Amino acid sequence: MISNRIYLSAPHMSGQELAFVQQAFATNWIAPLGPNVDAFEQEFAEAVGTTYATALSSGTAALHLALILAGVDVGDEVIVSTLTFSASVNPIVYQRACPVFIDSERVSWNMDPALLAETLERKARARRLPTAVILVHLYGQSADITPILEVCNRYEIPLIEDAAEALGATYYGRAPGTFGKAGIFSFNGNKIITTSGGGMLVSNDADLITHARKLATQARDPAPHYQHSEIGYNYRMSNVLAGIGRGQLQVLEDRVQARRRHFDAYVAALSDLPGIDFMPEAAWGRHTRWLTVIIINPERFGVDREQVRLILEAENIESRPVWKPMHLQPIFASAESVGGNVAESFFKDGLCLPSGSNMEISERQRVIEVIRSLANN
């Protein structure tokens, strides 16, 4: 008999979400917007330590609006981390701009500040500075924001933070996503908290958030009739889903701690195996361990990352390779890329293990036993 499937990161409801959803039904606030949306925005801004927030249909929508409001237009260049999911890059193409990919560093696996500085210096000499920089905070860990923000400010380039995977993380005590011109978060079904689908755009710039809200509601001008002076989008979050988000936000810290406990247990059970290493936690902050990620050295361990993944799958256990770098993606084959070897090594040997906050200890033990059984085979 095949055991129950263990998912990489399944949704985890607390039960507190239902009261907010029932309130939406009881008051007939089913249409987009409403009291839950307003409250979720305020509560989320307070939770991450920013001034303003607007709830949207996805993190991708949030990033798209951030690029529009940063002035990204046809033919512009936007610098972005290469080690990320395509949703960090696709909105650049929506604006018919050109991505420029920057390699990772090994401390946090995020964008290498030195490579960014070298790239901006080179582009400044060529009088071809990018219109924006998108900094991705990967797998629940903040990038080294300070040097990246400093070099962006030096060249007066807006920094947009993609913190879709890093809600609950810290950078010197502050939340990543709150340092740049704008930050984006995701509430997709596999994230640390979820609204089933949704995202948030945050900023300390009131005008930016006001304009984002307008664009997200089809850019209606203030008039009694339907009037539009710019192109808009249907990007707002519904009042029902915002209710789910409010309940989820109340248990954010519990969810972070549960995932960190999974990581600690994996380390205790697997770190003695030859050829197994873990994504490090940088000294500048807290890693949420949204996903526990291991690096497998096939020469020392005995089998490679893909063999481990397939054997786990045969045991009905979901795992996933580290993100395939964007500069290796067919759709971005012609894009400029700076470095790439570090990100490529993470993709070649990196595997994400089941890390959901509602994963049972017995399920985690199944994962551990399969991996241990493969060592030096």
Image (spheres, rainbow, N blue to C red):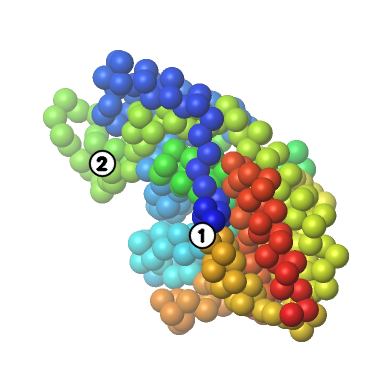
Query: Which residue lies most toward the top here?
Result: 27
State the image coordinates of residue 144 (x, y, percent, origin top left): 72, 55
For the point 75% across and 55% down, which residue is it? 266
The residues bearing labels 1 and 2 have C-alpha atoms spaced at a distance of: 52 Å
**Depth check: 203 or 287 in front?**
287
Secondary structure of the residue carrying numbered label 2: loop
Neighbor class of circle 1 (other Cα within 10 Å; few <14, some 14-19, many 20+) is few
Image quadrant where residue 367 sits:
bottom right
Residue 205, placed above or below residue 81: above
Name the residue tied to disc 2.
218
State the image coordinates of residue 364 (x, y, percent, origin top left): 67, 52
Sequence-wise, which precedes: disc 1 or disc 2? 1
Identified by mark 2, the residue type is Gln
Name the residue tied to disc 1.
1
For the point 82% across and 55% down, which residue is it? 268
Q: Is residue 160 left or right of residue 66?
A: right
Q: Is residue 340 left or right of residue 217?
A: right
**Depth check: 99 or 298 in front?**
298
